[in-house]
Image: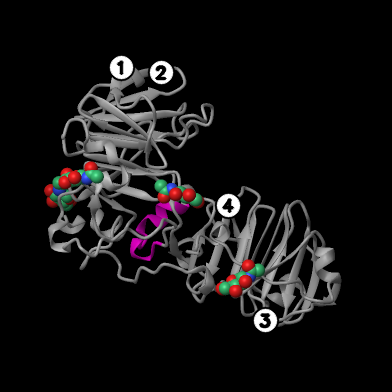
Amino acid sequence: MELFTKTLFLCLALALTNGAPAHHDAAVDDASLPDRCDGIGFDAITPDKNGTTFFFRGSHLWEGFHGPAQLSNESFQELDDIHNIGHVDAAFRMHNIEHQDDHDHIYFFLDDKVFSYYDQALEEGYPKEIQQDFPGVPSHLDAAVECPKGECMADSVLFFKGQDVHVYDIVTKTVKTKTWSHLPVCTSALRWLEHYYCFHGNNFTKFHPVFGEVSGVYPKDARSYFMKCPNYGHGGDYKVLKCSDVKIDAITTDDAGKSYLFAGSIYKRLDTRRDGLHAFPITRSWKEVTKGVDAVFSYADNIYLIKDDQVYIYNAAAHYTLIDGYPKTLKEELGIEGHVDAAFVCPDDQTVHIIIGGTISAIDLSATPRVVLRERPLPFSDIDAALCSAEGINVFKGATYYHYESPMTLAMSRIAPEPLNVTRAMMGCEE
Ligand SMILES: *[C@@H]1O[C@H](CO)[C@@H](O)[C@H](O)[C@H]1NC(C)=O
Ligand SMILES: *[C@@H]1O[C@H](CO)[C@@H](O)[C@H](O)[C@H]1NC(C)=O
Ligand SMILES: *[C@@H]1O[C@H](CO)[C@@H](O)[C@H](O)[C@H]1NC(C)=O
Ligand SMILES: *[C@@H]1O[C@H](CO)[C@@H](O)[C@H](O)[C@H]1NC(C)=O
């Protein structure tokens, strides 16, 4: 089972989006604004380049997974200028690494016109006729969604109209049309965390972007997953995490570039920032780890989660299956004892550095049994987490961190350097 199939049962109420909170004009009477929980659904859904997902209906939009509606023309001014159509048919975010000019632009489709925006500014020469920009793609579309190479055969856009899907190859500018009569007619479509969703009314159906196949039980009610609605979803409170309130338990990046932050009973993937940052219960991916973590590190194909005196090792290549015989004690696995505050392995290294109180120990992971190579005092204690990357080591303590060039400069350090503040770029928090 894929990680994100499991995490699909996510609690979006827990979503920690990294977009700015929706603007709220105090003069606007909320009752006059549409309510996204009313079950009517959306005309179009698209992320922007910052990973904020926009939901469009009529002349309004919602920015992110929570918050009130606002007029679309406050963000995308020209959308209702020309025809007074009053709604968007379809929208998608362009994924085009080869042509940086278009990359991350949002395209809107209204009747027979296409609008291209970058950072909420309309690009020169737009609106255009759809066929001028996307030859072979019909007018009056129902939905559109980008599909990057790797997930589709080539960098593509899927355009939906009725039961037909027009697969537009953005490099060759050619269209292949398929009919997916088993899918509902999509009023909007979204690619989110590497999965594809067709929205119809208040429901959505997950589909395969190449074959259109639906696996699992669909439709599901979007109000339980993609927005926060009273009496829907799995409860939990949305909270915007302020950078000055950050307190993490552990952080790690594996060889595949997947980056995880742990705090309390939740974790966040940091490398999927383009789709916004979202929090999931730790047990969604590591079901045996029910009480949070003290420290986490990645080594070879494995992720090591440490809680109290237990070490859990999961194989990342096999969608995080717990390796037979685990958890084991710290003593058995690493030859150490105590309450682990933080742990890290530097890229292409075989040494894990374990911080316990005011001490850092280096342990050779290639040797069995494990051998503590050296142990040194640190100029601080009570730290929360540590991460080593090509840029050096960051040792986190609350909302601040200490930066070091290498494990050696950290181990030799006698005076703590000036603490730096955790930033939005590091953790997706609000500054
Ligand atoms: C935005 O749209 C509303 C209603 O559609 C209209 O009343 C308003 O004048 C528009 N504002 C701008 C800035 O175009
Ligand atoms: C996206 O983020 C950048 C800075 O990170 C900001 O300048 C820009 O206004 C944001 N764009 C939108 C559409 O929110
Ligand atoms: C949504 O799904 C429910 C249950 O599967 C179904 O009864 C309802 O007709 C669906 N509505 C739409 C608009 O697809
Ligand atoms: C960190 O943030 C605090 C306010 O929260 C500020 O006073 C301090 O100067 C900042 N430190 C650095 C190094 O930017």
Amino acid type, residue under disc 3 in the picture: Asp
Q: Do the residues labelled 3 and 4 touch (CB within 8 Å)?
A: no
Answer above or below: position of 191 versus 150: below
Q: Front-most of 177 and 35?
A: 35
Mark 3 residue element: loop
The picture quadrant where one finds residue 35 is bottom left
Which residue does the numbered mark 2 point to in the structure image?
173
* Distance in Å between CA atoms under marks 1 and 2: 9 Å
* Distance in Å between CA atoms under marks 4 and 1: 38 Å
The location of residue 99, given as percent across then percent down, is 51, 27
Q: Nearer the N terminus, badge 4 or badge 2?
A: 2
Q: Are marks 1 and 2 in contact (CB under 8 Å)?
A: yes
Which numbered disc covers residue 258? Answer: 4
Amino acid type, residue under disc 1 in the picture: Gly
* Region in magenta: 3-15
Q: Do the residues labelled 3 and 2 touch (CB within 8 Å)?
A: no
Which residue does the numbered mark 3 point to in the structure image?
382
* Distance in Å between CA atoms under marks 3 and 2: 57 Å
Residue 425 on the magenta span: no
The location of residue 39, given as percent across then percent down, is 15, 54
Residue drawn at point x = 66 percent, y = 50 percent = 255
Q: Do the residues labelled 1 and 3 touch (CB within 8 Å)?
A: no
- Circle 4 packing at 10 Å, graded few (<14), some (14-19), many (20+), is few
Q: Nearer the N terminus, badge 3 or badge 2?
A: 2
* Distance in Å between CA atoms under marks 3 and 4: 26 Å
Q: Nearer the N terminus, badge 4 or badge 1?
A: 1
Left or right relative to 337: residue 177: left
Which residue does the numbered mark 1 point to in the structure image?
136
